Image (cartoon, coloured by chain):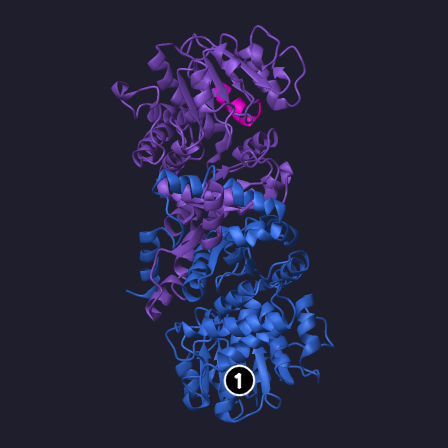
Chain colours: A purple, B blue
Amino acid sequence: MNYNEKALEMHRKHKGKIEVTSKVALETRDDLSTAYTPGVAEPCRKIAANVEDVYTYTAKGNLVAVVSDGSAVLGLGNIGAEASIPVMEGKAILFKAFADVDAFPLCLATQDVDAIVETVRLAAPVFGGINLEDIASPRCVEVERKLKEILDIPVFHDDQHGTAVVVCAALINALKIVNKKIESVKIVINGAGSAGNAIARMLLDIGATNILSCDRQGILSRDIPQSNWVQDEIASLTNADCQKGDLTAAMNGADVFIGVSAKNVVSKEMVSSMNSDAIVFAMANPDPEIMPDLALEAGARIVGTGRSDFANQINNVLAFPGIFRGALDARASDINEAMKTAAVYAIAGLIPDAELSEEHIIPYALDKKIAIAVAKAVYDAAVSSGVSKL
Amino acid sequence: MNYNEKALEMHRKHKGKIEVTSKVALETRDDLSTAYTPGVAEPCRKIAANVEDVYTYTAKGNLVAVVSDGSAVLGLGNIGAEASIPVMEGKAILFKAFADVDAFPLCLATQDVDAIVETVRLAAPVFGGINLEDIASPRCVEVERKLKEILDIPVFHDDQHGTAVVVCAALINALKIVNKKIESVKIVINGAGSAGNAIARMLLDIGATNILSCDRQGILSRDIPQSNWVQDEIASLTNADCQKGDLTAAMNGADVFIGVSAKNVVSKEMVSSMNSDAIVFAMANPDPEIMPDLALEAGARIVGTGRSDFANQINNVLAFPGIFRGALDARASDINEAMKTAAVYAIAGLIPDAELSEEHIIPYALDKKIAIAVAKAVYDAAVSSGVSKL
């Protein structure tokens, strides 16, 4: 049975993946009087007197909303709120399994920026954090920036920043193996949406200087008009020389390829045209830009994908559980650049240099140590950057 | 230690009462590929192709939103969204414990009818039902009626209909003991909000003919203007003779008193003025309209309250878990009058006539048989009244 059939059977058997359970007993009359009426009135009174007590007496401090409008789900596109639920439930159980964060899917029946923002704002009292997911670009960037302004709890668009964190961690380790420096490598990012934008920004943060960003029209260049304001931002940050051309031209002589685009858009010839010791991260889901065996045959030295069935799984699950664990533990009002950069180095640092290899640049996704290390680094960065409310 | 202190300690220790857990294992790479990427894409595709498959592959069919705006929480009044969370989490764990319904609190940062309706509408894709809770009257009635029109999943305001169902079940059994008929008894309801309205309507449905409804201004009468449209509705349904007077006047000669109002508003003298074999349901929470010992001293034959520490606990927990279980199992598009009436008789019927007594008119709240019986009756009524979508 393949993954598709197994997934259908599993989802059908359990009717989805999440349930809402009680942390307290409800067996006796006494239990009922403590957890519900009349006892429950007392924590209500405390919170009414001091709203910060909501973190003491409710689940808020450990609850994250996984918010989607279903407009850019995996590689499936705009499939709507209902069809996005299996992914958001999946995200919720990953949060729980890897970082003991309680997460609940909010799959919204709107794809309007202001309606999404307003719905999340009104639903926010019960949540300690907001994880945005699978919202099309540039809408997702607008939604995230508006919510960050309005809310005093962390707001994080995982497709942007979770991806960027894990890509940067993987790249730091891959560059150690090929003995190249981030400052001097030529990097091509294919896919100029919100993930491509966040990856470019974070690469610049950790020292990259030479980035070309491509979409279906070819290399983005600041001297020609882009199709939306997110692409304008990317163009302004990359390709200083205003090079023109398609992805094939961009990849010629590149040291690093980072794909957040679509299946099969990279050929063996394109990989062969890259610099020696080429690094190829082909992360389109579920089918990568080029299959790992083909990329290796074409001369790539290190290959990563988003999938669990190949080596070097560059998967957001390495980042988001620990990032939210750290942010919630610090009662952070934000997840800022310092916290994300701390997560990058925490993930990269989990593999000692001596253990790095072409097939092991990033920790194994199921290693429970990852979230603990990331959470600690993010917590410390929240405190030192002044966003902890503890 | 009293309930207040125990409740604070318990809520603090566990940081609230709910958690979001996984129904599936997430230990191996294979688990990850089935529950998340790449396998999860397949249930998404199925739902995108046929939106009704959301009930097959997600948790929707068992998920209820417990929605409040924090405007009328227990007897505490308008304490706001955050301070209402302990009650809504309590409701959620009652749903789970009594009927294996997964329920999640949505405590909204607005008290505007249209904003509440729109937020619930946009959040509805993940939910199989909506339970409204602790929203002030008449706003709650407006919110409920609008949502019932818009949504194709059951919407139920528990403070109205849950209360009405349980009161009617208790009254049916109490009247058997005192050997009076619902058609001929004089009933006084104190509290002319949404609960009082729903109780009056359901009493009429099961045969009552002589109801007086009171608020702080006294007996509602259709020939004088009321303070809002819900009270206009109540007045139009009760007090056919347009009697005037205060609660004391209303209770004189009454057979049944039903309080959904405030503590200590009923004196011993008022109970003594009632007809022989008086039935007193003093359900203000946490402190009843009159304490049971006083009511009994004053001559009442049967006394019920909302509390678990006295006999005859007339508590919504007898109704809402089974009502939603039945509605969800039938995939009902509504919770209609037939379903609510079915719940009334199912609850009343759980005590055989031979076991009825002054101190045992209603099943014990923690009896797990109740929800099963209610669910079956509600399911059958959903099917026979044509609202089941199965």
Helix, strand or loop at mark 1: helix
Regarding residue B72, the answer to whether it shows in the image is: yes
Is A316 placed above or below B267 here?
above
Chain letter, disc 1 residue: B
Magenta stretch in the rendered image: A192-201
**Image quadrant of residue A318?**
top left
* Main SS of residues in magenta: helix
Residue B256 in the image, given as x and y percentages of width and height: 54, 85
Q: Residue at x 59, y 44 (%)?
A: A81
* Residue B292: quarter of image: bottom left
Q: Position of residue B47 (x, y in %)?
A: 58, 47
* Residue A64 in view: no
Question: Dot 1 corresponds to which residue?
Answer: B172
Q: Is residue A363 above or below residue A116?
A: above
Most foreground residue, A214 or B152: A214
Amino acid under disc 1: Ile
Q: Dividing the image into 4 quarters, which one contains the C terminus of chain A?
A: top left
Establish if A219 lies above or below A44.
above
Provide residue A239's location: percent of width, then percent of height.
Answer: 56, 10
Q: Residue furthest top?
A: A241
Q: Residue furthest right?
A: B223
